[in-house]
Amino acid sequence: MKIGDLKGKLIVSCQPVPGGPMDDARMVTAFALAAVAGGASALRIESLDYVRAVRAATDVPIIGIVKKDLETSPVRITPHVADAVALARAGAQIVAFDATLRSRPDTIANIIAAIHANGALAMADCSSVEDGLAALKAGADCVGSTLSGYTGGPVPDEPDFDLITQLHDLTPHVIAEGRIRTPEQAIVALRRGASSVVVGSAITRTEHVTSWFKQAIAAETANKASKGVLAIDIGGTKTLACLVKDGKIARELHFPTDHTLGPDGWVEAVAATTLGWKGLYDRVAAAVTGIVVDGHWAALNPATLKLPASYALADKLRDTFGVSATAFNDAQSAAWGEHRFGAGAREDMVFLTISTGIGGGIVLNGRLLQGTAGHFGLFQGYFECSNRPLEDSVSGHWMNGEARKAGFDLEAREIFAAARSGAPWASHIISISAKRAAMLCQNIQLALDPRRIIIGGGIGLAEGYIDQVRSAFTFPALSLRPTLVPAGLGRHAGVIGAADLVAQSRSIPGGYNA
């Protein structure tokens, strides 16, 4: 066979838990045949006996390995030349070996030479891009991400997609392997550069799959038995404090955000107003405007809310409330809340909040995107504000400034009221804002292709605003036009989302436990 024969194929690793009830040649053969019946194009089999047994039952390609625990080397997978030769002679068309740059009984070059001399292809199981480069120079036919996370330290939960991409920069023949448990992860691996994908435990280790379900059920049961979450939304206009449990608001308080107090004062104001809730929650989650990195809060647009350069918000919350505390960006929290419990309907979606400023969040493939994703208000290059954030030409602060130019010192809600009363200057301000929001939505649709864009915020949900945004779309093709849906959770989206992220131990960069 040629290594290119596996391009775009699924490889199933049939390796039972050592000493478990499936650790038997008949069971391994049955797993292998079931995998082939389900569409596997190749198999990864451990031990000479199991390779021989499976080879006798099917002619699909086999990646053969031997595992040994050596006293003199940490290398376990096909550590000796003799192992590689025996696997090839037992019927493995591909022989995989540990290619990590660690002390070893036989050299990588000698193992590869022995594999080739016996008519098989050589697969280098790597833990790093340096491993892959050395193995390819020694003559390996393909490289795998197999050993990433298994050469010391805690084992990660997720596949090493970055290593897959790095290996693809060296060779097109990259086999993704290691902690790939879902079809979605397999697709990501292919998109990141893998030519084929190995899936093992998720298909053939019943003990592991059972434990995943057990752990998930136990965690959910514990979550339901736990106390609520005190969720706080500190915005440029108002501060909202809610007791949240199972996605529902149990108690609620809100008050204007006093800009003169600063962040210490805002947290202490929440503590004072929620004093009677003590004992009803065991975690605090804050959803705040701006950016949060490792629990430190900073403003992205000082015009919305002025903050110190890096404020230790999570620590302040923990010290003030005496429980574990986590901080998130408010718009990303709201996006997650709408996705899970609101208008997002658990589909691919973008959340866009238009209020004092503009924020947003993105949920694709059931995951909240990370980092600065969704900070649409900071886009530049729009309109006359080409050197300033987009929100400075659309949101509440801009509308207030435009009203003052017309001789009226009014806030956004009063501008909408004036428009409803027939004031042409107010209608003009709203129309300009809606046209600019429409352009933003169209660009979001082109970039991310969400099933829906959820519109929230005081301006976004003001009477008639979404209709004006829709009417301002310029794309002639209906298929290119965004589907706009009003937010379903209103002002509670951020606190519900932040509470759910904490309750499910989900995180986004910026999410941080103190």
Image (tube, rainbow, N blue to C red):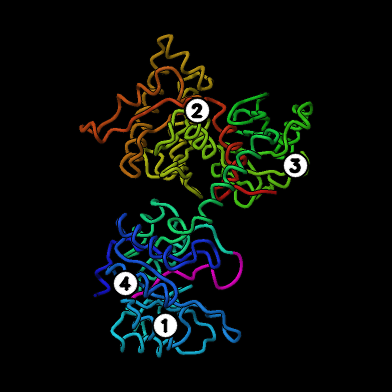
Which residues make up the magenta segment?
142-154
* CB atoms of marks 1 and 3 within 8 Å: no
The type of residue carrying mark 1 is Ala
Q: CA distance from mark 3 to mark 2?
A: 30 Å
Which quadrant holds the N terminus?
A: bottom left
Q: Position of residue 327 (x, y in %)?
A: 63, 43
- Secondary structure of the residue carrying tag 4 is helix
The type of residue carrying mark 3 is Val
Identify whether 39 is placed above or below 352.
Answer: below
Dot 1 or dot 2: first in sequence order is 1
Q: Which residue is mark 3?
A: 323
Given this view, does label 1 or label 4 mark the residue nearer the observer?
4
Looking at this view, is 16 or 335 the one in front?
A: 16
Q: Position of residue 283 (x, y in %)?
A: 70, 39
Q: Which residue is mark 4?
A: 56
Q: Which residue is mark 1?
A: 134
Q: CA distance from mark 1 to mark 4?
A: 35 Å
Q: CA distance from mark 4 to mark 3?
A: 60 Å
The type of residue carrying mark 4 is Ala
Identified at 78% across, 41% down, the residue is 322
Q: Can you tell which mark lies on residue 457?
A: 2
- Secondary structure of the residue carrying tag 3 is loop
Q: CA distance from mark 4 to mark 2?
A: 65 Å
Given this view, does label 4 or label 3 mark the residue nearer the observer?
4
